[in-house]
Image: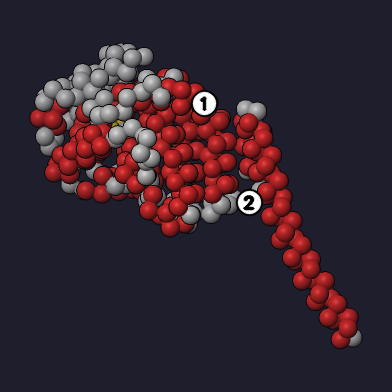
């Protein structure tokens, strides 16, 4: 009887161990398959493969592959992106968002329901909410540094930066009524992103000659950002969160000595944020990096959303 019991226990242990190994091997096999599918540009098949087994947010390989599958669905190709990036000067902040809108992949955006825009946001969120970060907190480069090795965290952050270039370009190409050369207001009647209320020092900021076509509160803004006179909460938060995460990665990613000197760009961004923080009532708007948190925190504070857009976006999209 004792022998039978011991044999039964041994069988259970072996079966349990085998099942664990089998699941690990199965996940690995599916990720290898997804890699091959992505190489061939089979986006739907790769995404299906990556969502066919339990999520592994603490596995950097899984995180990058799932984000790659979503980005593939969004029409993103690394080759095309880097071809354009090599010919792009990111030296100063005044033209930064205008430059992003000139990327070919940015100019496919047709609006907030554009499928490519939505899939790219999914790709970015996959990278942001990796490791132990939950959707109830602000993601940050510092958390990724804790959850992954330095090498893996840098890989995730680099990929996040590249996808952010494209998604920010999509965002400002549409909401900036931007033409093919990156000129805000060049593709329609709206000269500002939003028709701002005359709050804080918005008129002073917009009237200083550094915000392109948008020179005063009350000027025509994009209809898709208008919500009964207020700026649309969800869509405004998407832009704010995209840019705050971009800034977070930019300030925390280590660039090689051969990379472009981004010091002027970072200085311009910091200057814009310093001005912002003097006039908003809730300084957390400069650091919120989750759309759900942004919506929760600023649902009744539309003024700060408008101030952010005027002080940051109108200034950095000034072509």
Q: Residues within 10 Å of mark 2 (few under 14, many from 20)?
A: few
**Residue 288 in sight:** yes
Spot the residue most to the bottom.
Answer: 2
Q: Nearer the viewer, mark 1 or mark 2?
A: 1
Q: Quadrant of the N terminus?
A: bottom right
Question: Image check: 308 left or right of 157?
Answer: left
How far, Cα to Cα, is label 1 from label 2?
A: 30 Å
Disc on res. 178 = none
Q: Residues within 10 Å of mark 1 (few under 14, many from 20)?
A: few
For marks 1 and 2 on the same chain, the one whose residue lies earlier in the sequence = 2
**Residue 174 in sight:** no
- Position above or below: 83 against 291: above
Question: Image check: 215 left or right of 245?
Answer: left
Q: Give the residue pinned by disc 1.
A: 79
Disc on res. 54 = 2
Q: Quadrant of the C terminus?
A: top left
Spot the residue most to the front.
Answer: 257
Identify the element where label 1 is drawn.
helix
Residue 40, picture quadrant: top right
Q: Measuring from the top left, give residue 128's x and y in whole percent.
A: 44, 46
Q: Measuring from the top left, give residue 222's x and y in whole percent.
A: 30, 22
Q: Measuring from the top left, give residue 4's x and y in whole percent.
A: 89, 81
Question: Image check: 296 left or right of 14?
Answer: left
């Amino acid at each position: 009887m004792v022998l039978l019991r011991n044999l039964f226990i041994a069988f259970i242990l072996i079966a349990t161990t085998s099942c664990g190994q089998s699941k690990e091997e199965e996940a690995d096999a599916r990720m290898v398959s997804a890699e091959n599918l992505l190489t061939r540009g089979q986006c739907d098949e790769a995404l299906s493969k990556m969502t066919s087994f339990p999520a592994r947010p603490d596995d950097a390989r899984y995180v990058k592959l799932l984000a790659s599958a979503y980005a593939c669905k969004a029409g993103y190709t690394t080759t095309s992106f880097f071809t354009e990036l090599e010919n792009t000067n990111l030296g100063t902040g005044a033209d930064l968002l205008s430059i992003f809108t000139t990327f070919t992949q940015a100019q496919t955006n047709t609006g907030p329901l554009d499928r490519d825009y939505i899939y790219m946001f999914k790709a970015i969120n996959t990278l942001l909410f990796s490791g132990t970060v939950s959707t109830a907190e602000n993601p940050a480069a510092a958390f990724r540094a804790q959850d992954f090795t330095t090498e893996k965290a840098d890989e995730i952050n680099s990929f996040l930066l590249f996808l952010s270039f494209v998604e920010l370009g999509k965002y400002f190409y549409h909401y900036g009524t931007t033409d093919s050369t990156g000129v805000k207001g060049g593709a329609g009647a709206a000269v500002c992103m939003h028709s701002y209320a005359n709050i804080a020092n918005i008129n002073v900021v917009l009237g200083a000659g550094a915000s392109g076509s948008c020179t005063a509160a009350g000027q025509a803004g994009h209809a898709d950002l208008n919500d009964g006179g207020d700026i649309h909460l969800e869509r405004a938060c998407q832009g704010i969160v995209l840019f705050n995460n971009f800034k977070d990665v930019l300030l925390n990613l280590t660039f090689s000595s051969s990379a472009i000197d981004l010091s002027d760009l970072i200085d311009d961004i910091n200057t814009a944020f310093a001005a912002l923080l003097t006039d908003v009532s809730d300084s957390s708007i400069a650091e919120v990096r989750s759309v759900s948190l942004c919506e929760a925190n600023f649902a009744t504070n539309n003024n700060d959303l408008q101030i952010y857009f005027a002080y940051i976006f109108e200034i950095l999209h000034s072509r």
